[in-house]
Image (spheres, grey):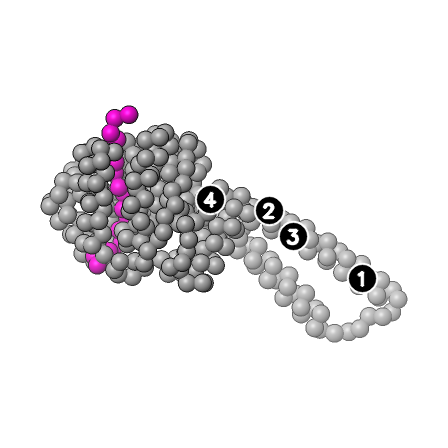
Amino acid sequence: MDQPKLYIVIPCYNEQEVLPITSELFLDKLRSLIAQKKINEESRVLFVNDGSKDDTWNIIKELSHKDEHFEGICLSRNRGHQNALLGGLMYAKDRCDVTISIDCDGQDDINAMDAMVDAYLDGCDVVYGVRAKRSTDTFFKRFTAEGFYHLMNWLGANVVFNHADYRLMSSRALQEFSQFKEVNIFLRGMVPLVGFKSTSVYYDRAERMAGESHYPLKKMLALAFDGITSLSVKPIRIITGMGFLVSVISFIGVLWAILSKLVGITVAGWTSMVCVICFMGGIQLLCLGVIGEYIGKIYMETKQRPRYIISEATEEDNRPE
């Protein structure tokens, strides 16, 4: 096999503090892979500026001027990590043979790229970067993250356990993935749907090198809920089963009330009535909320709005999707 052309795709949002540090690490890794003759000289590091409010885009442009191995694209506004990553992958798919997506913060072990490229050269089209352990996480984050992966698989979504968005994808896999047109995207759950030969590479995750995390609990919960509702309809089926169960219990309650009336042992009281009303009202609102979330996603899908728009690139041949 000829030496493949690799694009390392890195979404960035307000990363002016960490970007000058990690950009050198990414470039050193790219040069190391080139020196080992695993990839060819035309390989690139592609930064995707996700509408940053700080100096991130200017730093990316400066890097591209200093070294031809750096490229960058800028989205017209902030579209979120998943859309920014998708934009970078779609931009790269016709320019390279293989991509590796990774976050900008330096937490993911870039040395795992060697094993990823080796797996690609052995015939794998998709290679997942999987965390070997979560020793750097707090107990709460570790518990909620692992619980999320278990929940997703229980709901029927095919998600690789402890895998985020550090992965290798061949251009063939990306070409097929480009046919997925949904607006509500959850890449770590969608990529396994493409199929092709795949494997996993395990690595240890470090602390963030600089700056602050852009994924607080609120965003993590939103991402989790998007993943569940984008990949599975099991919550709707759970609601159906819950409705059937409550109906059966209610029917038994009605029979009990009628029998109590007939035998004359009814006791007047408002506590039981209030409990029943509150319980039923809560269940109904919860079910309506879940159903409404699915309806909202259907509404957004029917609009078919672009998932991202590229406003500027360090190369002049950028095209908005």
Residue 12 falls within the magenta-colored stretch: yes
Amino acid, disc 3: Gly
Is residue 274 visible in the rendered structure shown here? Answer: yes
Which x, y percent locates residue 167?
35, 42
Which x, y percent locates residue 38?
25, 33
For marks 4 and 2, the one nearer the N-term is 4
Q: Measure how far apart labels 4 and 2 are at the Cα level.
A: 20 Å
Is residue 173 visible in the rendered structure shown here? Answer: no
Q: Which residue corresponds to mark 4?
A: 159
- The numbered dot on residue 237 is 2
Which x, y percent locates residue 265?
85, 70
Amino acid, disc 1: Trp
- The numbered dot on residue 118 is none
Element under label 4?
Answer: loop
Classify the position of the N terminus by image quarter. top left
- The numbered dot on residue 256 is 1
How packed mark 3 is, by other alpha carbons closer than 10 Å (few <14, some 14-19, many 20 or more), is some
Element under label 1?
Answer: helix
- Span colored in magenta: 1-17
Q: Which residue corresponds to mark 3?
A: 243
The residue located at (19%, 49%) in the rendering is 24
For marks 4 and 3, the one nearer the N-term is 4
The residue located at (35%, 30%) in the rendering is 122
